[in-house]
């Protein structure tokens, strides 16, 4: 049996432009595409964090280093400039294939549409930031205990830190 598995994602990128008149697709900074192994014309799903819209389209290569995330065509009516979106790519994998971290990559781009981390797995993480209003993921751990130790060490140095865990297989609890 084969299953559709998450292969790569760009997490919480900011939409920089919406162009209803263009013929569909999503234009994405080539650096971000490379960081997660995404290709031009690859089918993607897009999830709007701000309004819960979801749609499928394909990628178009944007200029390197531009931070471009332009939603084109009819889908441009589903999002707005400044919205945070998640861009996800999936792959069909056989049940007998090793579906561990080596089979997918994830790029987090929450700061001015620039790569802040490239992860090969998701798990308990430590977030730091000014009063946690604009947190940055500094490290992802394979277990919650390690994440709590790192958080304690950061707080001992006077750095605001929090841990978050994806114990719900991709459905993060609200916190």
Image: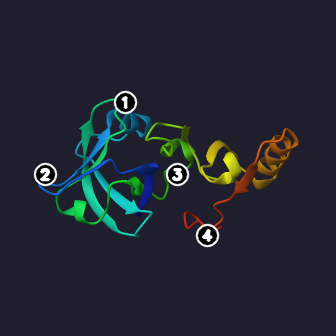
Where's residue 55, x and y in %?
A: 30, 64
Identify the residue under disc 1. Answer: 65
Q: Secondary structure at mark 3?
A: loop
Can residue 48 be seen? yes
Q: CA distance from mark 2 to mark 3?
A: 37 Å
| Picture layout, residue 31 above or below residue 46 | above
Who is closer to the viewer here, 38 or 81? Answer: 81
Q: CA distance from mark 2 to mark 1?
A: 22 Å
Q: Secondary structure at mark 2?
A: loop
Identify the residue under disc 2. Answer: 22
Q: Of the residues tagged 4 and 3, which is closer to the observer?
A: 4
Residue at 38%, 34% in the rendered image: 34
Q: Residues within 10 Å of mark 1 (few under 14, many from 20)?
A: few
Identify the residue under disc 3. Answer: 99
First-in-chain label (4 vs 2):
2
Q: Secondary structure at mark 4?
A: loop
Q: Residues within 10 Å of mark 2 (few under 14, many from 20)?
A: few
Q: Secondary structure at mark 1?
A: loop
């Amino acid at each position: 049996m084969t299953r559709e598995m998450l292969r790569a994602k760009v997490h919480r990128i900011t939409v920089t432009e919406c162009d209803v008149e263009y013929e569909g697709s999503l234009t994405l900074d080539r650096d971000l595409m490379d960081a997660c192994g995404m290709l031009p014309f690859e089918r993607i799903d897009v999830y709007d964090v701000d309004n819960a819209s979801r749609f499928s389209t394909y990628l178009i290569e944007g200029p390197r280093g531009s931070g471009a995330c332009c939603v084109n065509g009819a889908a441009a009516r589903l999002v707005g400039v400044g919205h945070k979106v998640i861009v996800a790519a999936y792959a069909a994998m056989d049940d007998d294939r090793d579906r561990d971290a080596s089979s997918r990559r994830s790029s987090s781009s929450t700061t001015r549409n620039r790569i802040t981390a490239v992860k090969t797995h998701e798990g308990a993480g430590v977030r730091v930031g000014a009063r946690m209003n604009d947190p940055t993921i500094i490290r992802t751990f394979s277990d919650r205990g390690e994440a709590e130790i790192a958080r304690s060490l950061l707080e001992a140095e006077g750095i605001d830190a929090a841990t978050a865990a994806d114990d719900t297989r991709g459905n993060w609890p609200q916190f």
